[in-house]
Amino acid sequence: MALKSELLLNKVQVAMFMKDAVERSVDWLYLRNLLHRFIESKQTFPFAELCYLHANVFNSENDEEELYKLMAAVELLVLAFDMFDDLEDLDNFTEPWMDIDRGEAINSSSFLYTLSLSHIHSLSSPYRSEILGLFLEYALQAMKGQHIDLANAVKTEKECLQMMRWKSGSLTALAAEAGVMFACGKRYEEVKEYGHQVGIAGQIENDYKGLFTPHKQDRKFLKPSLALLYLQRKFNQTSVDILQYVHSGKDFDEYFGSIVAFKEKLLEAGVTQYLNVMKHIALKKAETYIKKLPLPAEKLDELLTNLIKK
Amino acid sequence: MQEIVNFLIENPDILEKVVNGQASLIGVKDSDELLGIITGLTDGLKLLPPASFWK
């Protein structure tokens, strides 16, 4: 996400604050360099941007340095969860944490997770206890969602959406709510709700893209997802064909001939349309909640421009 | 939502009536769902991120 408003987030600075947090906690150069490498691998900081957007929409006179510390904590938490996710799913082998000893990678994730919480504790914001409470609440929720995913416990569309709300929506809701809490010391039910919905929409998009990542295919497609649940209804012969491919263990280009042919099959089966509908429902729900916020029209428009109308 | 999407894919004439307000869908809870269905089935199927929160 690149902020469309006049707000300008300095991405280099976010990475710098993340590294600074590491430096303050790690005096052993080996571990420090390893964690710096992981931070440097991040090209974008969408959760920091979400936090920054909300802090500035709810208060235009924030302490910038403190805000960057908060954003660094948010991104450290998300980085830790990304690492845990890859290590648990055994995918994304291009990531630097998948290229090292597994024990070291797991310990690094735990370190970054704890560092994120400890970094909140070091804020001088009068709302740091409340912000820490948000981190703990949403981290637990995200872990619950992750475990449901890992256990393949999802059987229905409703359960899948709930899992996505916890696993992915929690982190977007956290970034938004942390920004608001930092800015004005309040919680808004609307922010919580649309924060989750934006996360669900993002996850649907990500899951769709994941269907075309060869090395992720066999494991990811077999895991319960909206796409798989739709296919399992076997509304048409193409769905049956795709299910056969899923269980074949082959890559899509090997099975269907090309990525274009595979995309056509997904369209023919209705998977693409279904995912698009589910994404747009999440976005419409988010839009409705944003419009309910007690904010001036220009502030609402700023949120809508950055979160929905992209 | 799976049945509704499949039904509308198989019956584009009904989708057109829904879009034009000439038909309503049973089982759709609110306007967010209805607008999501219409947008999702008529926006050219661009599964592009609203906001790229995910790498």
Image: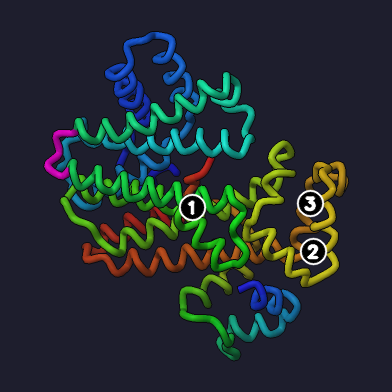
Residue A239 tag number = 2
Q: Where is residue A61 in the image (x, y as percent from the top left)?
A: 15, 43
Side (left or right) of A158 relative to A140: right
Q: Residue at x 64, y 52 (%)?
A: A208
Chain bearing tag 3 is A
Q: How many labels does the image show?
A: 3
Looking at numbered disc 2 in the image, what kind of residue is underneath it? Answer: Ser
Q: What stretch is highlighted in magenta?
A: A123-127
**Distance from the alpha carbon under mark 3 to that under mark 2:** 10 Å
Above or below residue A218? Residue A295 is: below
The residue to which callout 3 is attached is A246
Looking at numbered disc 3 in the image, what kind of residue is underneath it? Answer: Val
Side (left or right) of B11 relative to B46: right
Residue placed furthest toward the top: A29
> Mark 3: which secondary structure?
helix
In depth, the one of A270 and A165 nearer the eye is A165
Residue mark closest to the camera, 3 vs 2: 3
CB-based contact (under 8 Å), mark 3 and mark 1: no
Q: Position of residue A280 (x, y in %)?
A: 53, 64
Q: Which residue is drawn at 17% across and 41% down?
A: A62
- Dot 3 or dot 2: first in sequence order is 2
Chain bearing tag 2 is A
Which corner quadrant of the image does residue A14 belong to? top left
Q: Which residue is drawn at 50% across and 46% down?
A: B52
